Image (cartoon, rainbow, N blue to C red):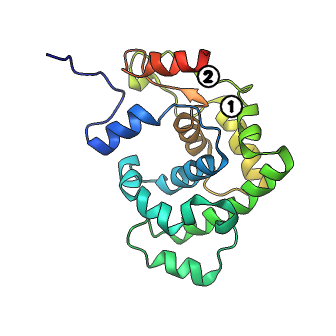
Amino acid sequence: METAKIRCFGDTPIYIDYHDNEWGRPVHDDRKLFEMLILEGAQAGLSWITVLKKREAYREAFDGFDPKKVALYDDAKIEELMANAGIIRNRLKINAAIINAKLFLKIAEKHGSFDKFIWSYVDYAPIVGHWEKFEEMPITTPISDQISKGLKKQGFKFAGSTIIYSFMQAVGLVNDHLKSCCVYEDILNANLS
């Protein structure tokens, strides 16, 4: 009989799949980075499972998270999004996605990619957490504070330090899987190769 896998979180198939296959794994694709930045902002005040359940609807509503398309959204598109029951219909969050898309593209142009910009904060290598319990994990760090401050100074919305730290965890800038987690070593070894 197979022993139950130990996970940091996840008790539903969608959550387990996200935990095992995405969370904490380094992302270097700008479109995927943009997606996670928008979804983390959309999560503010809500649970992550709520966002995960709406993720496919978000992908469809936000043109596959193409920042070039999102940056061009106008009032008519905003109203269309506000009427879309598949996403979180919060005008501030929708407007933030559009503003952030424009700024995301400026950063990508200046640095060659958003990937190069964001990974420079961690010297292009994931920070590895060594947590025994979920409660030990921080919700912000000096680096998330620094990134947040820099992004907000450029005009980003929904980019507070807590949101940015969640983004960092999601895209693998930090590996915050518990040491006992079934994917901790897998991610650690993948980052070393």
Dot 2 or dot 1: first in sequence order is 2
Front of the two marks 2 and 1: 2
Where does residue 122 sit, x and y in percent of width and height?
A: 70, 27
In the rendered structure, the answer to whether residue 70 lies left or right of residue 111 reads left
Where does residue 102 sit, x and y in percent of width and height?
A: 73, 62
Instruction: Quarter of the image for the C terminus: give it.
Output: top right
Name the residue: 48% across, 66% down.
60
Name the residue: 36% across, 27% down.
8
Residue furthest out toward the front: 193
Secondary element at tag 1 = helix
The label on residue 143 is 1
Instruction: Look at mark 2 in the image and give the residue it sits on.
Output: 127
Residue furthest out toward the left: 1
Three-letter code for the amino acid on which mark 1 is drawn: Ile
Q: Which one is in front, 40 or 135?
A: 40
In the rendered structure, the answer to whether residue 116 lies left or right of residue 133 reads right
Secondary element at tag 2 = strand
Q: Quadrant of residue 16?
A: top left
Q: Are marks 2 and 1 in contact (CB under 8 Å)?
A: yes
Where does residue 24 sit, x and y in percent of width and height?
A: 51, 31
Name the residue: 68% across, 31% down.
143
Q: Quadrant of residue 112?
A: top right
Instruction: Quarter of the image for the N terminus: give it.
Output: top left
Three-letter code for the amino acid on which mark 2 is drawn: Ile
